[in-house]
Image (spheres, grey):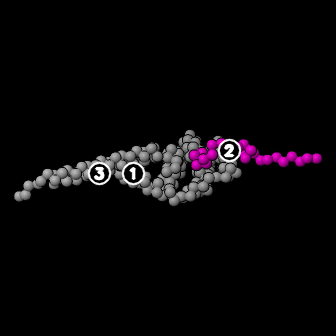
Amino acid sequence: METINAQSWFMLGGVILVALIGIGAWFFFKKRQSHRLQLRFGTEYGRTVADLKSRTKAESNLKEREKRAERFHILPLAPAEAARFVLAWKNLQGSFIDNPKGVLVQAEQLVRELMLLRGYPMGDFERRAADISVDHPTAVKNYRFAQRIVLRDERGEASTEELREAVVHFRALFNELLEIREVKKELLQPKVVEMQT
């Protein structure tokens, strides 16, 4: 049996040290990646981990959402288009007392129309919610909550108060997707042309 000389021990120690540094760097990278995803997705991160019952699967899912969202062409709204949406929302909101079920349907349709116009893909609900979560992680919680009430309403189980809550949640999502904090009043009011005599 050959004896291992000092140089071999030194090389073996170097290989072990490099391996330990590599493992440490990998753990550091994974920890930073997890932290980045938690910051970006907020409560959606925790919900995805709980749904998939695995942090690794959830993080893979969230990274796939990010990659998919990079291919979207999300467009800003022209001020006139934003004003049209704001006016449409005010009109539907004003008729809630007379027609709460109809307003809920209109609110969902208006949110879908806004998503489509902005450039979000219009797959099934879960896909839409996942797509929205990339850029609007706090708003997606409102979307999910409103959608649960829509499903309860379709089964005839939602109260008027729940319908109101769903419309409020759709409104929060709507405002987030609109990405305009305040639409100028002159865009909402028709211009009156004065005729000079």
What's the amino acid at mark 1?
Glu
Q: Position of residue 78 (x, y in %)?
A: 67, 52
Q: 95 left or right of 156?
A: right
Upstream in the sequence, badge 3 or badge 2? Answer: 3
Magenta region, residue range: 174-197
Visible residue check, residue 108 = yes
Q: In the rendered structure, are the residues bearing label 1 and label 2 in contact, judged by CB atoms less than 8 Å apart? A: no
- Which residue is tagged 3? 22
Image quarter of the N terminus: bottom left
Disc count in the image? 3
Instruction: Provide the secondary structure element on which disc 2 rests.
Output: loop
Q: Position of residue 87 (x, y in %)?
A: 69, 47
**Residue at the spot x=62%, y=53% of the render?**
76
Mark-to-mark CA distance, 3 and 1: 21 Å
**Residue at the spot x=39%, y=54% of the render?**
60
- Which residue is tagged 1? 59
Upstream in the sequence, badge 3 or badge 1? Answer: 3
Residue at the far top in the pictured view: 161
Residue at the far right in the pictured view: 197
- Which residue is tagged 2? 183
Residue at the far left in the pictured view: 1
Image depth: mark 3 or mark 2 in front: 3
Determine which quarter of the picture holds residue 183.
top right
**Residue at the spot x=53%, y=45% of the render?**
139
Q: Position of residue 53 (x, y in %)?
A: 35, 49
What's the amino acid at mark 3?
Gly
Q: Which mark is residue 138?
A: none
